[in-house]
């Protein structure tokens, strides 16, 4: 069910975060045009496409690839910009026009008057139409960036934050913003970034889809936090044009563009959230930056004023110096079961995104996947996956892809069963070291006979098997 | 009960066990007589272990293809039909006595090397034969290891398939 949106994510909110949604297509200074707004409305038609998509996914996808995606791509990216920092005002104005009024309630009512978009996303999520539908849904979801986020009905995911020096990339699956724990986690991280002068990339579309360059699942790849940071680096030149002295700050450049110099925020609001952050994340509570913020907030509360956080708190400096940003990132998950600061958490975040998208990331998730799911999984790892031709003398049932550029896997295969062996469906993964892993249903006849030392069999739940006296048994 | 010819030679792309590829489902059904029919799932595995005659099975593969089959004993002879209801594959397993070029089930696969090149297909995990550089069509072998001869040189033949995919 739609959750309560944290105040600072709503259009018109007093909160103003220091980050900016980076997107190659979003040149600084670009102002949404009537065309881009129209494109947004065109994109709404996707909601109507959904019912057809359910009946004939392949056909509709082929049609929509030509008909809708170009519209979506442009409209989406512009709308993503609208939802971002520098275009907030334009976004609000647009919505105001649409709402015919100016109050927050009227704006929200206007947003809620877009049921098709949210129905589409919600249905795509429920049906789990995997890569293609999720790609579309992701594009639509990208339009929900910012204030629209809370209106999408989503699954609960994890928020993840990747930091490199003074750059923080925060990925917020939509529903994380809709649960108290998620709100506090996001708030704490944003506050910390703001107070520390970090540059914050806030990616609210990352939970299930998104716009290339801003995280989330796209047609061919998930953009990782590291890639987001690399993307940020590509904008340095543009930023320096905006801010020739280079003392700040993508955020400052953006803020300058919007005419906003900082944040005025209720100190009580800050303290309330800091308390919650402390309950959920003791490490954040003990953080000196947040301790300083707490002191400032308490002073402001005592003085009876607002807490002002100037935009130039955020310093953005030369991340392109780093040869490989991704490798130097420290990744933490803010909610979930992977310990904070664990290096594997980056993979955990990626895996989390994958699971939400129905993409298998471990052997226990393989069974039931389509070969397209598997392909998507390896593509996410940056590998090139190429379909291998069917050999004429064989049954032609095996679907095989060569995997190039993956550290472990050389080839993946889905066999629908039949033929002279086994009769059952199986998945086969050939590792670079020669190990062959097959995932089978041991309840269906599949006789491996001798299992050599480099062959491994797993059941549908990912448990390793052995074959003893004609029967499969746990390893 | 109809007993197949378990000594019949294995002729690639043509025949085995007294059945000819291309025979219709109905003619073979008439030959075999009434059988118990099963949906091929986990239960058929146990049924096959105890099977003393013929059983019929229908299985929908992962790609949606429906395979109808007759199986003699525990897959000593397996006859497969698809959409055209024409026998397109005969698989024989341990217990079958007929030979191909003097090679029988249970023999070492490498014995075929005296007449053929043996090629492992890692897509289907089967072995195929080449003679003077050309495919020997209509026959393939599955061994006890399902891995190339380079990796495991000695492998016993466990299944032999006589097929004509064009008849599916």
Image: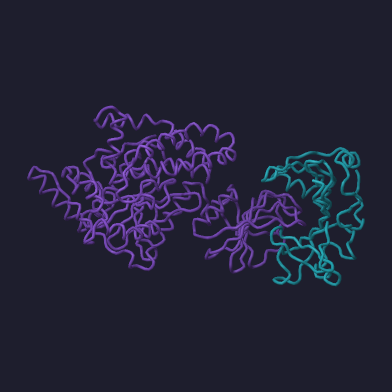
Chain colours: A purple, B cyan
Can you tell which quarter of the image residue A375 is in? bottom right
Q: Position of residue A273 (x, y in %)?
A: 23, 45
**Who is closer to the viewer here, A156 or B51?**
A156
**Is A106 placed above or below A304 here?**
above
Q: Position of residue A22 (x, y in %)?
A: 35, 52
**Who is closer to the viewer here, B98 or A17?**
A17
**Is A366 placed above or below B143 here?**
above
Furthest toward the left, the residue is A303
In the picture provided, is A307 more to the left or to the right than A106?
left
**Who is closer to the viewer here, A107 or A330?**
A107
Can you tell which quarter of the image residue A165 is in? bottom left
Q: In the image, what residue occupies the spot 47% across and 43% down?
A: A70
Furthest toward the top, the residue is A100
Residue A18 showing in the rendered view: yes
Q: How many marks?
A: 0
Q: Position of residue A147 (x, y in %)?
A: 32, 39
In the picture provided, is B102 more to the left or to the right than A127?
right
Residue A283 showing in the rendered view: no
Q: In the image, what residue occupies the spot 82% across and 50% down?
A: B89
Q: In the image, what residue occupies the spot 67% across and 59% down?
A: A467
Q: Position of residue A105 (x, y in %)?
A: 27, 30
* Quadrant of the frame with the C terminus of chain A: bottom right
* Quadrant of the frame with the N terminus of chain A: top left
């Amino acid at each position: 069910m739609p959750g309560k949106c944290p105040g600072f994510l709503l259009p018109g909110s007093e909160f103003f975060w220091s980050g900016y949604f980076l997107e190659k297509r979003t040149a600084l200074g670009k102002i949404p045009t009537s065309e881009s707004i129209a494109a947004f409305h065109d994109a709404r038609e996707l909601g109507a496409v959904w019912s057809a998509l359910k009946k004939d996914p392949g056909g509709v996808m082929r049609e929509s690839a030509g008909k809708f995606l170009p519209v979506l791509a442009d409209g989406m990216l512009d709308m993503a910009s609208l939802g971002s920092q520098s275009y907030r005002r334009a976004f609000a104005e647009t919505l105001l026009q649409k709402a015919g009024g100016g109050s927050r309630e009227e704006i929200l009512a206007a947003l809620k008057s877009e049921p098709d978009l949210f129905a589409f996303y919600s249905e795509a999520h429920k049906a789990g139409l995997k890569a293609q539908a999720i790609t579309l849904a992701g594009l639509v979801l990208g339009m929900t960036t910012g204030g629209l986020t809370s209106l999408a009905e989503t699954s609960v995911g994890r928020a993840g934050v990747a930091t490199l020096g003074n750059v923080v990339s925060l990925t917020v699956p939509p529903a994380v913003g809709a649960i108290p724990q998620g709100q506090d986690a996001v708030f704490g991280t944003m506050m910390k970034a703001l107070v520390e002068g970090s540059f914050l990339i806030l990616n609210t579309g990352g939970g299930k889809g998104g716009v290339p360059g801003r995280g989330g699942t796209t047609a061919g790849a998930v953009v990782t936090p590291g890639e987001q940071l690399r993307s940020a680096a590509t904008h340095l030149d543009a930023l320096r044009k905006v801010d020739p002295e280079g003392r700040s700050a993508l955020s400052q450049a953006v803020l300058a563009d919007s005419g906003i110099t900082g944040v005025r925020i209720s100190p009580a609001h800050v303290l309330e959230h800091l308390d919650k952050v402390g309950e959920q994340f003791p490490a954040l509570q003990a953080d000196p930056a947040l301790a300083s913020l707490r002191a400032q907030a308490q002073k402001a509360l005592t003085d009876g004023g607002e807490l002002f956080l100037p935009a130039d708190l955020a310093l953005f400096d030369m991340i392109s110096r780093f040869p490989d940003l991704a490798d130097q990132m420290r990744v933490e998950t803010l909610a979930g079961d992977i310990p904070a600061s664990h290096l594997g958490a980056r993979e955990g975040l990626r895996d989390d995104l994958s699971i939400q998208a129905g993409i298998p990331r471990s052997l226990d998730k393989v069974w039931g996947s389509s070969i397209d799911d598997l392909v998507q999984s390896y593509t996410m790892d940056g590998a090139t996956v190429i379909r291998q031709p069917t050999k004429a003398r064989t049954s032609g049932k095996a679907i095989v892809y060569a995997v190039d550029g993956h550290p472990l896997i050389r080839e993946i295969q889905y066999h629908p069963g039949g033929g002279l062996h086994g009769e059952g469906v199986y998945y086969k993964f050939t590792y670079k070291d020669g190990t062959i892993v097959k995932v089978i249903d041991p309840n269906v006849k599949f006789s491996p006979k001798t299992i050599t030392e480099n062959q491994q069999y797993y059941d549908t739940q990912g448990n390793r098997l052995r074959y003893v006296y004609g029967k499969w048994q746990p390893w | 009960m109809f007993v197949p010819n378990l000594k019949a030679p294995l002729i690639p792309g043509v025949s085995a066990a007294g059945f000819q590829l291309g025979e219709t489902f109905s003619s073979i059904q008439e030959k075999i007589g009434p059988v118990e029919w099963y949906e091929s799932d986990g239960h058929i595995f146990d049924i096959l272990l105890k099977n003393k005659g013929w059983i019929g099975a229908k299985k929908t593969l992962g790609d949606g293809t429906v395979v109808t089959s007759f199986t003699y004993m525990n897959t000593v002879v397996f006859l497969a039909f698809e959409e055209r209801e024409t026998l397109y594959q005969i698989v024989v397993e341990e217990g079958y006595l007929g030979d191909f070029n003097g090679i029988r089930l249970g023999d070492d696969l490498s014995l075929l090397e005296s007449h053929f090149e043996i090629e492992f297909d890692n897509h289907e995990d089967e072995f195929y034969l080449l003679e003077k550089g050309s495919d020997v069509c209509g026959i393939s072998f599955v061994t006890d290891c399902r891995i190339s001869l380079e990796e495991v040189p000695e492998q016993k033949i466990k299944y032999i398939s006589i097929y004509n995919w064009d008849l599916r």
